Image (spheres, rainbow, N blue to C red):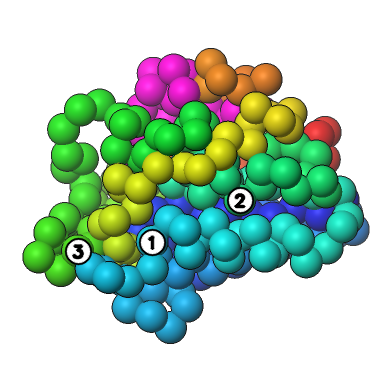
């Protein structure tokens, strides 16, 4: 088995966000990878108007999935669920989807169709530049309140401005309709409240809850490892 981790919005360096769980999986002989998402400026092209969008993110993740025919579990975090819905569709090696505080869009649905209705207070949106990002001063309290001080200190260096286009671009497929799926509800998540996660999770095959914030793979990597090994 291998794991492909698809990170969320407004961050870069997926391998950093994933590193604590990846290390525990490696001890059990499970390899993992975290492809870069071009819409977050990770492909050498600036994010923003005219820059990479959802299609480029989908292509990057699909390339990672097709690079190996080993049975694969895809871990999609937050916005990563929009990317994974299309990227994992029709890929025979993908055996399971784990959605972490994430989205399971129907084909034709976009990120903007999920949520609570108004702009999230923790986001800084710049329509003129065509980008959005997390307000650094709200990063820890919103997303990392249950992580240790080392993670909290380092995380700001792994934020990114992302192309605003991805919020309105629709997923072209719904892999969760083809592949077994598990939804991990993070009950202490202050970015995507648990009540919304439970609503999104109705489309998943199985639902598991964990008493964590938005990034359980950093705050409780042992629990995420155990869940993955059970899949």
SS state under label 1: loop
Residue that sits furthest to the bottom in the current view: 44
Q: Residue 119, image x and y in percent? A: 17, 39
Residue drawn 65% across the image and 27% down it: 177
Residue 17, above or below 52:
above
Kindly identify which residue carries mark 1: 53
CA gap, disc 3 to disc 1?
11 Å
SS state under label 2: helix
CA gap, disc 2 to disc 3?
24 Å
> Which of the 4 quarters of the picture holds residue 174?
top right
Kindly identify which residue carries mark 2: 87
Can the viewer see residue 17? no
- Whichever of labels 1 and 2 marks the residue nearer the N terminus, that label is 1
Other-residue count near label 1 (Cα within 10 Å), few / some / many at <14 / 14–19 / ≥20: many
Other-residue count near label 3 (Cα within 10 Å), few / some / many at <14 / 14–19 / ≥20: some
Kindly identify which residue carries mark 3: 130
- Whichever of labels 3 and 1 marks the residue nearer the N terminus, that label is 1
Magenta stretch in the rendered image: 182-200
Q: Residue 61, image x and y in percent? A: 61, 60
Q: Which label was assigned to residue 94?
A: none
Q: Residue 101, image x and y in percent? A: 48, 35
């Amino acid at each position: 088995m291998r794991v492909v981790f698809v990170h969320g919005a407004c961050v870069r360096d997926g391998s950093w966000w994933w590193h604590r769980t990846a290390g525990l999986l490696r001890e059990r002989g499970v390899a993992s990878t975290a492809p870069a998402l071009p819409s977050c400026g990770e492909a050498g092209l600036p994010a923003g108007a005219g820059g990479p969008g959802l299609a480029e993110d989908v292509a990057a993740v699909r390339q990672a999935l097709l690079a190996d025919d080993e049975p694969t579990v895809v871990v999609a975090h937050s916005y990563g669920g929009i990317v994974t819905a299309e990227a994992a569709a029709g890929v025979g090696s993908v055996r399971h989807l784990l959605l972490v505080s994430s989205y399971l869009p129907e084909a034709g649905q976009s990120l903007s169709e999920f949520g609570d209705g108004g702009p999230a207070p923790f986001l800084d949106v710049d329509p003129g530049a065509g980008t959005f990002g997390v307000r650094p001063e709200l990063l820890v309290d919103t997303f990392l309140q249950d992580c240790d001080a080392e993670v909290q200190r380092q995380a700001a260096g792994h934020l990114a401005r992302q192309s605003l286009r991805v919020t309105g671009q629709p997923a072209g497929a719904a892999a969760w309709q083809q592949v077994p799926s598990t939804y991990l509800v993070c009950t202490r998540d202050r970015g995507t409240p648990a009540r919304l996660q439970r609503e999104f999770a109705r489309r998943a095959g199985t639902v598991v809850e964990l008493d964590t914030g938005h990034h359980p793979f950093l705050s409780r990597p042992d629990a995420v490892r155990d869940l993955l090994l059970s899949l």
